[in-house]
Image (tube, helix red, strand yellow):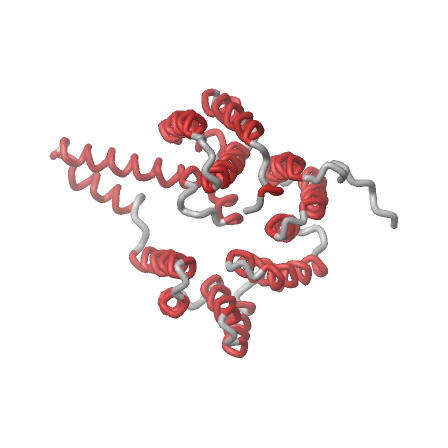
Amino acid sequence: MNASTIPDLDTIRKWIDDYAKRVANLQDEKGKGVELLFLRDAIHDGLLYYRSRGAFIDPEETKLSNFDALLDKNAALFLKIAGKKTLKTERDKISPSPEKWWWWLDEKVRERKSRKIKKTITTAGIVVAVLLVLYFTFFRLPPAEQSYLDALTQAERLIYEGEVDEALENIQKAINIFPDRPTPYIMAGCLKEMIGENEEAQKFFTQAQGLYPNEVNFLIEKSNWYFRLNLLERAYSSIIEALQKEPENLAALNLLGSIYEAENKIPEALKVYTKVLELAEEQGAETMIPIARIKIGMLQFRLPLDIPTSFPEEEQ
C-alpha cells in the first residue's frame, strides 16, 4: 500500500462511526445488499495500513471490534436482510481473503445451526436417528464435493505461500474429481504462465475454454485469476478482450475497475465504476448498484486534488 491511496485517519474514523450505526440498525440495510461488507473492507484496509506504519489505533480497533461482535451475533438477521444468495454471489466475485470473516457470515450461521442440532441430538435421545439423518442430509456436502472444495482451498493457500508445485498437485486432484468444471484448469493455466511454462498453460486454457458456455465467461475468469496472482498486465489484456466482445458486461467492467485500482489508476477506475453504476441501473442489476456506489465513494477520497470527481461525456 502507498500513502497516496489511503484516506486519512479522520476519514476512517467516520467510516467506523457509520459502520457502527449501521450494524446497530441492521433492519435499515434492507435493499442495500452487502454494501455494509464493502464498507468493512475499506475500514480493514485502512487500519491495516496505519497499523503497519506504527500508528496508535487501539481506540479505533476497540470500537470496531465491539460492533464486529454485534454483527457476528446478528449474522442471521443480516443474512435475512441482505440475502444468502446475494452474499455468496458477491463473495465469489471478489474472492476476499480468509481474514475478512464478515464475508462468511452465512457459514457462521450454518455452523451455529449445526451445533444447535448436535446439542439437540445429545439431549433428545428419542429422536437421535431422525436428527442425524437431517444433519447429514442438509448440512454436509457429498464426499466428492467436499474433497473438490478442500483441494481448491488448499491450492489457494499454497499459491499465496509461494508453493506453486504443491498448489498444482492439489489443482490436479480437483480436476480428477470433477474433470468437467473449468475453474481448476484456469487456475493451473495461470500458474503455469506465471512460472514460464507457456505451452503447458495453453493446454490448460484450451481445456477450460471448452467447458464455458461462451468465450467471454472464459476470458473474465482468466482475467480474475491473473488479477489474484498479481499478473496485472495479463489481467488487463484478458478483460479488455472480453469487453471488446461484450462492452456492457458488468462483471468484466467491475473487474477492470479493480485492475485500475490495483495499478493506482484512480481516475480511470472511477470512470469505469461510474459506467458500471449507470449500466447496473439501466439493466436492473440490483446487487451491482450498491457495489458501484461504495466503490465510487471510496475512490473519490483517493483522487488527486486537481482531478475532477465527475467526468464529462466523451465525444462521439
58 horizontally vs 89: left or right: left
Q: Residue at x 21, y 37 (%)?
A: 118
Name the image quarter holding residue 284.
top right
126 horizontally vs 18: left or right: left
Q: Which residue lies furthest to the left in this view?
A: 125
Q: Which residue lies furthest to the right in this view?
A: 316
Q: Residue at x 38, y 65 (%)?
A: 163
Q: Position of residue 151 (x, y in %)?
A: 35, 61
Q: Nearer the viewer, residue 45 or 168?
A: 45
Q: Nearer the viewer, residue 89 or 155?
A: 155
Q: Nearer the viewer, residue 314 or 216?
A: 314
Q: Where is residue 240 in the image (x, y as percent from the top left)?
A: 68, 59
Q: Is residue 86 visible?
A: no
250 horizontally vs 186: left or right: right
Q: Which residue is drawn at 54% across and 76% down?
A: 198
Q: Can residue 81 be seen in this view?
A: yes
Q: Residue furthest bottom?
A: 199
Q: Nearer the viewer, residue 263 or 255?
A: 263
Total numbered badges shown on the rendered structure: 0
Q: Position of residue 203 (x, y in %)?
A: 52, 76
Q: Which residue is drawn at 55% across and 63% down?
A: 212
Q: Where is residue 66 in the image (x, y as percent from the top left)?
A: 39, 25
